[in-house]
Image (spheres, rainbow, N blue to C red):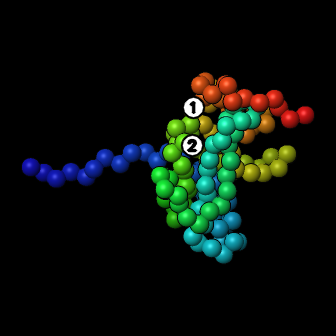
Amino acid sequence: MVATEPLVAEPTVMLTDEATGELRRIVTEEGDPSLGLRVFVSPGGCSGLSYGMSLEDHSDDGDEVIKQDGLTVFVDEFTANFIRGAQIDYVKGLMGAGFTVHNPNAVKACACGSSFDTGSNAETAQKCAD
């Protein structure tokens, strides 16, 4: 019998080259190589769910810890259910620059770009801020 490598599941999210470059710049500027990007989803927002991101230096119980090009991304179990297969990008535009999520699970999104609906979370939608 031949031993085989275990199948490795695709990571929940991947960073684009632009996001990798910007995250590397931020981590270097902070002077703490243990920092990683936490990507999270919380109920609320005008479409039902909202994206959030922060810098953290450790994982929490149940987190998926994604290593990509020497960088770390943390995703909790709740969030993984809504963003599996997503790409984190860094974009620059007339209105500013920042990280954004390209989420294949989103069936609709608000114009603000930080709120989305997967088709099963409409009950958590809130009125857009004026």
Q: What amino acid is at disc 1?
A: Asn
Residue 54: tell me if it is visible. Answer: yes
In the depicted view, which residue is nearer to us: 77 or 17?
A: 77
Residue 125: image location, x then y, percent:
72, 29
Query: Residue 100, percent across and down?
Result: 69, 45
Q: Name the residue under label 2.
A: 79
Query: Which residue is found at the position 25% from the left and 52% from the top?
Result: 5
Q: Nearer the viewer, mark 1 or mark 2?
A: 2
Residue 15 in percent (x, y) is at: 57, 51
Q: Residue at x 69, y 30 (%)?
A: 124
- How many residues crowd around disc 2 within 10 Å: few (fewer than 14), some, or many (20 or more)? some
Q: Can residue 68 be seen in this view?
A: no
Q: Residue at x 63, y 39 (%)?
A: 102
Amino acid type at mark 2? Thr
Q: Is mark 2 on a helix, strand or loop?
A: helix
The residue at 72%/48% (across/down) is: 91
Q: Mark 1 and 2 residues: CB-CB less than 8 Å, in contact?
A: no
Disc sitting over residue 105 in the figure: 1
Q: N-terminal of the two: label 1 or label 2? A: 2
Residue 56 vs 40, above or below: the answer is: below
Task: Give the SS element for disc 1.
Answer: loop
- Residue furthest out toward the bottom: 31
Q: Residue 28 carries which label?
A: none
x and y percent of residue 59 in the render? 53, 60
Query: In the picture provided, is 84 more to the left or to the right than 92?
Result: left
Q: In this view, does 128 lie to the left or right of 74?
A: right
Give the quarter of the image for residue 56: bottom right
**In terms of depth relative to the viewer, which is nearer, 76 or 2?**
76
Tell me: residue 26, above or below residue 62. Answer: below
Query: 100 above or below 67?
Result: above
Count of marks placed on residues: 2
Q: Which of 14 and 126 is in front in this view?
A: 126
